Structures are given as C-alpha cells and as structure tokens.
C-alpha cells in the first residue's frame, strides 16, 4: 500500500473528496486509507436495492462513518431490473451531485489493479478503440470533475491483506461469485492463470495501460488541432477529410461524435464510426440516422451533422422582408444584378399579395425563357441543394400559387428583363456559412 499512501499524501492533502463507497472490501480499504491521512472525505453510497442484504450493508456503512466522524450521503434506487449501464449512469450522476453539494471536483472510486487487467481483457475480446484498450486512468479529468482511482497500484489480494491487518469491516457481494457475469469469469479463470505466469503481472498491465494512454493522448491532441481546421458549425469539409490518414479519419469522427453527444456519449459506439466510414468510402450522398434525433448527411463535399429533422412547414404573406435560416428575401429599390439572387416583377402579371412557403409534393415551375414545367424536386437535385434543406427552403408564389422564384436557385417566366417594365424588385442575401 506504500504507493497508494504516497499518492494520497502527494495529491489529496487539504482537499475535500467524494468517495463512491459500496461497503465492499475495495472501497472500505480506500475509505480507511483516506481517513488515516486526515483527508476530508464524503462517503457517497448507492443502494442499488437489488440484493436483500443491501439495506443492512448501507446501515452498517452509515454506522461506521458516524463512529469515525465521516460525512455520509446515500441514495436508494427503485427496485428494478435494469441494465448494468443504467446503474452506472445513476451512480455517476449521484457522485456528481454530491460533489456539487460539497463544492469539490474530486471524485474517487476504488478500482484496483485486478480491475484494470479485467477491463483491458474484456475490451480486447469485445472490440474497442485505443482509448478503450488502455482500460482506465489513474486520474481522469472530465469537464468540471476529476476522477481518481488511487488503488490502481495494488491487487485484490493486497487489499484483503490490508483489511485483515487493520480489522476493517466490509461485505462481499454474492453476485461476484456468479459465472453469469463476464467480468466474474475473467476474474475466476483468466487472472489466476496470468498471476501464475507472473506474480507481478498487474505491473505489466499498468505499464501497458500507461503506454497506450500516452499514445492516445498525443493522437487526440493532433486530432483536435485538425478538427479546428476541417470541422466548423457541425459541417465536416470532406475535401480536407479525405486527405487525412484513414486512422486519423476514424479518430476525427469519434471526436466529433463525442463533442456532439457529451454526457450522452454512451449511446454511441464504434459501430457508428464504422458505418460512417463505410458510407463515406462509397463517394455518394447519403443520410444516416444517429441516436437521439441526430442525422448525418453527405452533401457532396460536406458532411453535415444535424438535428434539423422535422421542421414545420410554413406559408406566409410576404411583406417587404422575410428572414429564414439560409438568408433573407427583401424588397429593394434598385439592383444591377441579373443572377438568380434578384428577380424583377410586373405586378400586373401576378395576383398579389406574394407569399413565401415551403415546397409541396407536386410543385412545378415554368422556368425563365421556357414554356415548360419543371418539377421543383428536380430543380433542387440539379442545383445540388442539400437534402436536409429541400423541405424548408423558401419558395415565392403569388396568391394563385404560381411559383415565381426559388431564391438563389432559379427564376420563373415571371422574371422581367432589366430594360422592360417592372415595379417590384426582390433580392435574396445568402447568410454566411
């Protein structure tokens, strides 16, 4: 325990810390170590309310804290058949809540060296990424919180010896003996073999973990520098993206998703990155649905991450000016432009007032200098209007619903030449991206 004690003395003195304590041998060992070093510790206990012994264990832990003048906080979850991920999220939220209550950013858990070995092996067997293969860090800063695992230096056997020598009470969770759980199978069958081969194998795994963490942090630093150049306003520049090494491309997508989902990152896995990578390799436009309402759209040389699905349609009377997400349509007194961003109209040829609306299913426009109809859907495709914008892009019509203009895209037969008679000039100003 010397390395653990030294770490506590060097890093936690004069700090208030929150300890996630289950009343198991690991967390009780850490609680005692912190207490002996006079650390201001808040014992935070989550009663999962699954085992019949849970209530008794919570009470014994509370009594222990009372006798040692340790602040005790607890929460009892509703009895329910939920996944392990559900309980992990609940535990984390509670620990953060207690940290906020006591105005500290330090949260400690009792993960030890054997836990690290098990975590690395499990992630290797189920597939992960470089971050995952490294297991977990001794110190991990996450937003406003610093998560610390001081027992990472010692094995379960050393913890039991410490507890026995110091007469520390604890309870054993009976579910830890069940082969139903994958982690238990690794603990009972794989770890003994590794330790027979090398009694200090936990030190080898710790070095392996630290090496991967150092490599991963370096790569992530480079990826974030690249991201600032190629990803802005939720749009990835694919021309720049495809010039990157394939591995960096994948890490870039991982980081983009991490930034988008933040606390909900648990709903994203390597599967989503793999699917996006494959879709991008086909050089075709696509739309891919992500969890929680996000969609990813390839629009030629752009990859757009959007939550804009389900926008409401509109049909409103136009009165001098209309603002929308892509830009502004307004009446102007004069303009020398002749492109699709300006249209000149003779009010005698229209039924006023003009209206601005979204696209309807069978919309057609008689384009300038032609006598035939063209489907608006086909216009959008030909002009490469992003798919996500087609159903919300403004279309100017008269009161008989004749399509007059699709701003910035195409003009109708109603557009009047500069040297002809007109009394209305409309201008479209595209919003800067």
Image: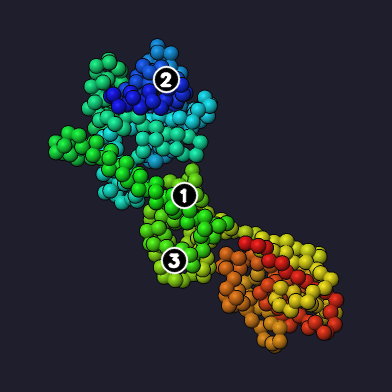
Tag 2's secondary structure? loop
Q: Nearer the viewer, residue 188 or 53?
A: 188
Tell me the distance, in whole angstroms, between the alpha carbons under discs 1 and 3.
Answer: 20 Å
Q: Nearer the viewer, residue 203 or 342?
A: 203
Tell me the distance, in whole angstroms, between the alpha carbons under discs 2 and 3.
Answer: 52 Å
Q: Which residue is mark 1?
A: 258
Neighbourhood count class around disc 3 (C-alpha, 10 Å): few under 14, some 14–19, many 20 upward: few
Tell me the distance, in whole angstroms, between the alpha carbons under discs 1 and 2.
Answer: 34 Å
Residue 313, can we see it? no
Task: Measuring from the top left, give residue 253's x and y in whole percent.
Answer: 44, 56
In the displayed structure, does residue 316 sit left or right of residue 257? Answer: right
In the displayed structure, does residue 422 sit left or right of residue 207? Answer: right
In the displayed structure, would residue 383 be above or below residue 274? below
Q: Which residue is mark 3?
A: 242
Q: Residue at 67%, 77% (x, y): give it.
A: 410
Q: Residue at 61%, 77% (x, y): give it.
A: 379
Q: Residue furthest top?
A: 67
Q: Quarter of the image holding residue 402?
A: bottom right
In the displayed structure, does residue 201 sit left or right of residue 311? Answer: left
Task: Measuring from the top left, give residue 136's x and y in whole percent.
Answer: 35, 39
Q: Earlier in the sequence, mark 1 or mark 2?
A: 2
Tag 1's secondary structure? helix
Task: Measuring from the top left, give residue 87's x and y in whole percent.
Answer: 41, 36
In the displayed structure, does residue 6 sit left or right of residue 195? Answer: right
Q: Residue at 60%, 75% (x, y): give it.
A: 383
Q: Which residue is mark 2?
A: 39
Q: Quarter of the image holding residue 22?
A: top left
């Amino acid at each position: 325990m010397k390395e653990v004690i030294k770490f506590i003395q060097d890093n936690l003195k004069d700090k208030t810390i929150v300890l996630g304590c289950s009343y198991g041998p690991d967390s009780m060992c850490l609680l005692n170590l912190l207490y002996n070093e006079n650390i201001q510790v808040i014992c935070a206990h989550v009663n999962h309310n699954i085992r019949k012994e849970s209530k008794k264990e919570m009470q014994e832990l509370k009594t222990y804290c009372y006798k040692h003048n340790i602040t005790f906080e607890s929460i009892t979850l509703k009895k329910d058949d939920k996944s392990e991920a559900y309980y992990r999220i609940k535990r984390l939220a509670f620990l953060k809540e207690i940290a906020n209550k006591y105005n500290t950013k330090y949260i400690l858990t009792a993960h030890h060296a054997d836990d690290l070995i098990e975590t690395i092996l499990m992630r290797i067997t189920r597939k992960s990424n470089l971050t995952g293969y490294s297991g977990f860090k001794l110190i991990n800063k996450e937003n406003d919180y610093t998560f610390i695992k001081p027992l990472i230096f010692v094995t379960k056997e050393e913890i039991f010896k410490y507890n026995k020598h110091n007469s520390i009470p604890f309870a054993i969770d009976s579910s830890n003996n069940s082969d139903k759980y994958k982690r238990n199978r690794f603990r009972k069958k794989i770890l003994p073999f590794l330790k027979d081969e090398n009694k200090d194998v936990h030190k080898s795994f710790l070095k392996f973990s630290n090496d991967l963490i150092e490599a991963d942090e370096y790569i992530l630093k480079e990826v974030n520098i690249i991201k600032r150049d190629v990803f802005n306003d939720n749009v990835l520049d694919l021309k720049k993206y495809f010039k990157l090494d394939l591995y960096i491309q994948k890490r870039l997508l991982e980081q983009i998703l991490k930034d988008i989902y933040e606390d909900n990152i648990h709903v994203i896995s390597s599967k989503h990155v793999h699917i996006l990578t494959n879709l991008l390799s086909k050089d075709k436009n696509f739309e891919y649905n992500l969890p929680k309402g996000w969609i990813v759209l390839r629009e030629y040389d752009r990859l757009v991450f959007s939550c804009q699905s389900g926008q409401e349609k509109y049909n409103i009377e136009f009165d001098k000016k209309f603002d929308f997400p892509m830009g502004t349509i307004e009446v102007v007194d004069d303009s020398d432009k002749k492109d699709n961003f300006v249209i000149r109209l003779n009010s005698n040829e229209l039924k006023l007032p003009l209206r601005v609306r979204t696209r309807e299913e069978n919309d057609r426009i008689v384009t300038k200098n032609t006598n035939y109809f063209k489907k608006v859907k086909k216009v959008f495709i030909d002009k490469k209007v992003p798919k996500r914008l087609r159903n919300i892009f403004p279309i100017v019509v008269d009161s008989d619903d004749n399509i007059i203009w699709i701003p910035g895209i195409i003009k109708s037969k109603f557009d009047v030449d500069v040297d002809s008679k007109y009394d209305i000039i409309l201008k479209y100003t595209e919003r800067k991206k």
